[in-house]
Amino acid sequence: MTGQKIIQPTNRFRNNAKSVGIGNSFWDMSERNGLAGIVAELHDGILRTEAGHEFVNFSCCSYLDLDSHPKVIQGAIDALRKYGVLDHCIPRSRVQIPALLELEASLGELFAADAISAISASVASAGLLPLIASGHLGNGTRPLMIFDKNCHVSMAQAKPMCADETEVVTSRHHDLDFIEDRCKEYGQVWYICDGSDSLGGYAPVKELAVLQDRYGLQVYYDDSHSTSAFGPRGIGYVRSTIPVLNDRTIVVTTLNKAFGTSGAAILLDGHPHETLRVIERFAGALSYSQPLNTAAVGAGLASAEIHRTDELTALQRRLQDRIALFDARIRTEQSGTTFPIRLVPVDDATVIEAGRRVFEAGFYVSPVFFPIVARGTAGLRVMMRAGHTDEQIRELCAVLAEVGAPSVAQSCEGAGS
């Protein structure tokens, strides 16, 4: 039909046409090469496809392997038997089972914070960030919200909702000068970023704390990738690094990764009881009939108890040993850090082929490409776990070197030539 209006998107905060148009070709290539949509069963740490191909997974976020810990599995079973219901489907603001409060009390003691549970970190961010924008998680003033350019999509997707409530801008990755300049211009500023990101980096927590003290900057961290894997009792990078914990810092973390269970925790310090109730009642899906199910609560209680024992320290130490063993063989920008993720650089044109060769050799590492990473910065993302053996690490490194990964030996040879 003629005469109909054509909608022109503003694309101020997202551009699906660009992301899908470019990124989908990489996903299609991944699928054609058997690197996406894999279906496999897990047996004693080895995955096996229906066709019989066996491989070790180096693309899993369960860094301490607590998701298969017998006590965690038993905790889920015990909770189901005790309460006799899988999912008490009603908003928690109306009715909730005692186990949910028990879990939040346990997490609160473990992480030394007021803890609110959610079914995922994405749900938590989608609910909390608009309340920050409207001033309801502050002093009532609508703040300038600065989203880090590289912040995870679970936070970045909230930009349009926040922009309906306040002014939203995007900064370059951890651009401290930009943040400080905005603090001088605006009476209230929030910075939204990852405390530990999915590509192997940490936020400048100490430097941001200086701006928090100097200007009253408030910071929203997603510290999902370091929780449990880092810090005393697994409190994560942010909470073990920041000098002062107060109501100018909010930390969201998943319980699905190194914690080994399901759901997420919102960690707050110094907020009044009324603020906690606003979150419970108005933070998007947190106020729906979607609390953590009973099995997840029971598993979470069991994992929290493991975090209070020397076993967690031993698992963290074993994970660091695996990381050091990898770094001794393959050189990456993350080498020498405590982070369990390494990004092995590979050209955009060859990253899928490299991933396929590694998979055929018996190891799965994720090829990452736009929009997961910036165009021209593709690579193979290696995620190490405490449960990996020395032999598996060595064999993976040998395969990565064969497909062109920069080895430490090559680096040393180049330095001596």
Image: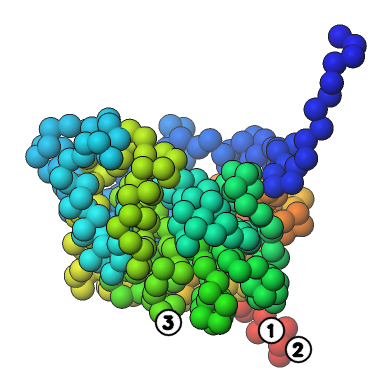
Q: Label 1: how many residues lie within 10 Å, few (<14), some (14-19) or many (20+)?
A: few
In this rendered view, identify the residue nearer to me: 298 or 397. Answer: 298
User: Which of disc 3 and disc 2 is earlier in sequence?
Assistant: 3
* Quarter placement of the C terminus: bottom right
* Picture coordinates of residue 118, whole percent (x, y): 36, 47
- In the rendered structure, find residue 417 and report the number of the disc placed on it: 2
What is the three-letter code of the residue carrying label 1?
Glu
Question: Nearer the viewer's eye, disc 3 or disc 1?
Answer: 3
Q: Residue at x 17, y 32 (%)?
A: 85
Element type at mark 3: loop
* Picture coordinates of residue 94, whole percent (x, y): 25, 36
What is the three-letter code of the residue carrying label 3?
Pro
Looking at the image, is 156 positioned above or below residue 390?
A: above
In this rendered view, identify the residue nearer to me: 297 or 130. Answer: 130
* Left or right of 402, for residue 243: left
- In the rendered structure, find residue 413 and report the number of the disc placed on it: 1
Q: Residue at x 31, y 75 (%)?
A: 232
